[in-house]
Image: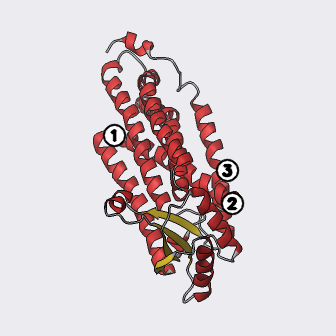
């Protein structure tokens, strides 16, 4: 790899404006941090985001109806349940396999699943749900009623936190083995940057739009961590590769700039194609997956930004700091000899 290649790809001088990227990251994260702090102090669960019944416990009531249920009907049903006194009902529509139904000449059915807050032996809520559902769908038949107790919901939340912690730990161990320890530390900070932004974003949505997270949200965060880490590894691998061939011809900041620009088109194209698919899912998919898809959209967008502008410049700053410390120690050693 020649010096010509180094300058061919110098389209964006990311290192020159690293404090701009650091400031932008701080600006993006701080509102979410304040929102999480507000929820910890003021929400009933004292958690950084508003959590749904998956983590607090709840009851799932399912009805079978002999027709397709549109997304607009789900929203109408949710509003009616809220007016009937059911707090934060979460409605999911599960459709049967229409191919099998047609083959067997059986009328296709749809299952309407209603999730509500856990209340032991709460017959009144069941009656209210039954009244609202049967008013819109007289042929509806009760399929099952199942409950998740608060203790089980708490256990699920703790296990979700363990999953996040193990994901971070696994990434650090792998990167330490595959690259160097400083690469692993910077990658971990970058991932924490992305996860914190997504959590903060949903904390803000929780305050202003009463959005509650569920188990799917944890899945989305884990996916975002994997995707963001993939982008960061691509950039770091190119930095490492260029460092082998250009260490004597260029400074480390120049190598970082060249590496980022060489991988820039690939990172942006990969993220854009993924975001197009996710946007289609968000606008045309089911109502119950909207928050999951939104978390993916926000996470992939911030992950692409952090892998290009945040992680690479943070690595350069870290190396510069280490070199400065080495130089200072060397000068002190020479002074002592004199």
Q: Is residue 43 above or below residue 164?
A: below
Q: Evaluate whether residue 217 shows in this view.
A: yes
Cα separation, mark 3 vs mark 1, equals: 33 Å
Label of residue 20 in the image: none
Q: Position of residue 223 (x, y in %)?
A: 42, 50
Find disc 3 in the rendering and name its residue.
31
Quarter containing the N terminus: top left
Q: Comparing marks 3 and 1, which lies closer to the viewer?
A: 3
| Label 2: which secondary element | helix
**Mark 1 Cα shell of 10 Å, populated few (<14), some (14-19), many (≥20):** few
Find disc 1 in the rendering and name its residue.
180
Q: Residue at x 67, y 55 (%)?
A: 34
Cα separation, mark 2 vs mark 1, equals: 41 Å
- Residue 26 is left or right of residue 145, and the answer is right
Q: How many marks?
A: 3
Find disc 2 in the rendering and name its residue.
207
| Label 1: which secondary element | loop
Q: Nearer the viewer, residue 303 or 104?
A: 104
Quarter containing the C terminus: top left
Q: Evaluate whether residue 325 shows in this view.
A: no
Q: Is residue 69 above or below residue 276?
A: below
Q: Nearer the viewer, residue 276 or 21?
A: 276
Q: Position of residue 256 (x, y in %)?
A: 44, 26
Sequence-wise, which precedes: disc 3 or disc 2?
3
Q: Nearer the viewer, residue 23 or 297?
A: 297
């Amino acid at each position: 790899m020649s010096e010509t290649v180094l300058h061919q790809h110098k389209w964006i001088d990311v290192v020159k404006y690293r404090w701009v990227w650091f400031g932008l990251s701080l600006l993006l994260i701080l509102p979410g941090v304040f929102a999480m702090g507000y929820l910890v102090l003021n929400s009933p669960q004292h958690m950084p985001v508003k959590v749904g019944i998956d983590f607090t416990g709840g009851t799932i009531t399912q009805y079978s109806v002999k027709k397709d249920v549109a997304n607009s009907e789900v929203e109408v049903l949710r509003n009616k349940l809220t007016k009937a006194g059911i707090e934060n009902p979460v409605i999911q529509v599960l459709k049967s396999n229409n191919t099998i139904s047609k083959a067997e000449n059986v009328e296709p059915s749809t299952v309407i699943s209603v999730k509500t807050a856990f209340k032991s032996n709460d017959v009144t809520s069941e009656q209210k749900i039954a009244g609202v559902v049967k008013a819109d769908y007289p042929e509806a038949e009760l399929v099952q009623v199942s409950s998740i107790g608060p203790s089980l919901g708490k256990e699920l939340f703790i296990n979700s936190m363990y999953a996040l912690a193990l994901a971070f730990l696994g990434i650090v161990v792998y990167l330490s083995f595959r690259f160097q320890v400083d690469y692993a530390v910077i990658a971990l900070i970058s991932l924490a940057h992305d996860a914190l932004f997504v959590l903060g974003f949903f904390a803000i949505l929780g305050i202003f739009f009463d959005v509650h997270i569920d188990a799917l949200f944890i899945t989305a965060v884990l996916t975002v961590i994997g995707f963001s880490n993939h982008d960061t590894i691509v950039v770091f691998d190119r930095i490492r590769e260029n460092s082998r061939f250009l260490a004597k011809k260029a400074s480390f900041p120049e190598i970082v700039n060249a590496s980022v620009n060489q991988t820039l088109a690939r990172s942006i194209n990969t993220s854009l194609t993924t975001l197009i698919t996710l946007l289609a899912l968000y606008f045309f998919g089911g109502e119950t997956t909207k928050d999951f898809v939104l978390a993916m959209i926000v996470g992939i967008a911030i992950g692409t930004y952090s892998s290009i502008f945040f992680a690479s410049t943070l690595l350069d700053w870290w190396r510069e700091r280490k070199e400065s410390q080495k130089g200072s120690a060397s000068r002190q050693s020479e002074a002592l000899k004199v």
